[in-house]
Image (cartoon, rainbow, N blue to C red):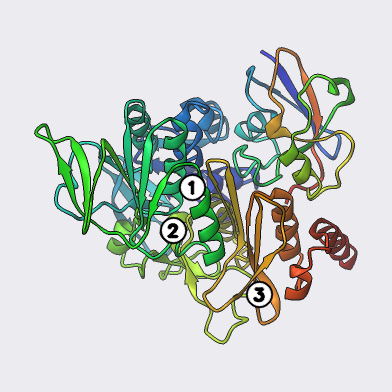
Amino acid sequence: MSRSDDVLIVGAGQAAAQLACSLREAGHQGSITLVGDEPAPPYQRPPLSKGFLTGAADEDSLALRAPGYWQANGIDLLLGETVVEVDRGAGAGGRALTASGRELVFDRLVLATGAAPRRLDVPGAQADGVVVLRTLADAADLRRRLATARDVVVVGGGFVGLEVAATATVLGARVTVLEAGPRILGRAVSEATSRYLTDHHRATGIAVHTDVSVTEIVSAGAGRVVAVRTADREIPADLVLVGVGADPRCELAERLGLQVDDGIVVDEHLLASDGTTIAIGDCAVAVDPTPWADLDASAPCRVRLESVDHAVTQAASAVRTVLGEPSPHVSVPWFWSDQGTAKLQIVGLRRPGDRATVRPAGPGRLVVGFHRAGRLVAAEVVGSPADFMALRTLLGAGHPVPADVFADGDVVLRQLAKDARQGSISAC
Amino acid sequence: MPKVFYTQPDGTVVAVEGSVGDSVMATAVRNGVAGVVGQCGGSLSCATCHVYLDERHADEFGEVGEDEDEMLDCTASDREHSSRLSCQLLIGEGEVHVTVPPEQL
């Protein structure tokens, strides 16, 4: 029966699009409808902070699928539309109402509503020239402003902020990054990587300040931003990018009475607390999907991840749930962030108690591993894609890569990975 | 319009119309060609768009770059002499023929 279910996906981002495409590829027979509040068909967000701003990538090149793909594959895109109401019938089905008055009947509801960028909550934050970056429209606006901006202040030393800072520097602006915490990327990466990237950005001319909170945005008569004020200084700015994280969009889930706790809480099959609604992508908070989640004494913690890989792999697991062949979502998540010429790649999920080991690497490279209960569980790599690929392979194959092996510069990770891959193939 | 021919591991061939300047990876992904993943969108971060480039094109594309070279050493299916990351193969005026490897992840 489930193959013929009519599937309604609220959201049209990476997770939503992947689920729709993968369902069709898997032979799903029922209707598939995506409702997205942005006007553009599903597109890639990562280039919005990089290539799209420099002009290397245009809107067409961001499309996740060719324009004709959706119709050819029987996937209905309702764009510029918002689901405002959902009536649950008995079981998994129900009907949804959109803002423009369309009624959508479904057998299975999927929430892939994404996340919304946080705004600054300080006096003057509404000034013209204070922007966030999440959508294509945001990026087009930012690109237009960057063309004339001289003094750019980035509030928040996270991925989006640092990527934009690096891009703005390349475009010729004077850039200052203000991070409220003691170091950039404080939650995302270890101290070693944080320090490395701080040095990298400073070497390119970016002023990176930590432990600094914005107290006020100063604007001129016309309401245009002219400076950013902190406790002890005023920094000139004609453009302020606010990159202080994003909050999951849970309004619909809350109205449906689903459990929400910094995201829509889902189980290992991506099912929300009602046991039938699926939630995937940036809006979902799930048990740590790594095979080593319960290696430490604490109970497996819940994680909410914002990344392409996570959206894609969760969608793959959700396909199995929709088709009635559920299997627990297990994966070793990976991330990348191109910050100017620094290519950061991360695999696995590091926890505060994990032991960090820096591996000898050549100039311009950083390779850090994290061990838990004697086995490698995560790694951070800058400027060394081969080491990253090898580590990703090793983690995927379940190789423990003990800390002494990891730290031994004479051990060639690629060879270790090749052996592990062949080992895992022959073990099958 | 230039055409890209993707030969699947089972021998079936999928032909897709491409545009000059687009990559062989993006052309595959946008048209739902199986076996080309391209998770990172072409930023040389994932090595999931590995293909074997037909010998006839050996001189038609730019050389393997440094990062590409490193990543090709770690692809899920073994590297061969003709291995390329298809995000680095930009379509020109002519046809392109590639073979998709059995595994990408």
| Most foreground residue, A173 or A35 | A173
Host chain of mark 1:
A
Q: Position of residue A19 (x, y in %)?
A: 54, 48
Host chain of mark 3:
A
In the rendered structure, the answer to whether residue A223 lies left or right of residue A331 reads left
Give the residue pinned by disc 3.
Answer: A371
Query: Which is more N-terminal, label 3 or label 2?
Result: 2
Query: Which is more N-terminal, label 3 or label 1?
Result: 1
Disc 1 element: helix
> What separation in Å lies between label 2 and label 1 (alpha carbons)?
11 Å
B91 to A331, vertically: above or below:
above
| Most foreground residue, A230 or A61 | A230
Query: Do callouts 1 and 3 point to residues on the same chain?
Result: yes
Give the residue pinned by disc 1.
Answer: A201
> What separation in Å lies between label 1 and label 3 (alpha carbons)?
28 Å
Point 46% across, 51% down: residue: A159
In the rendered structure, the answer to whether residue B32 lies left or right of residue A149 reads right
Point 32% across, 32% down: residue: A150
How many residues crowd around disc 2 within 10 Å: few (fewer than 14), some, or many (20 or more)?
Answer: many
Q: Residue furthest left?
A: A221
| Most foreground residue, A171 or A48 | A171
How many residues crowd around disc 3 within 10 Å: few (fewer than 14), some, or many (20 or more)?
Answer: many
Location of the N terminus of chain B (image quadrant): top right
Point 67% across, 42% down: residue: B37
Give the residue pinned by disc 2.
Answer: A184
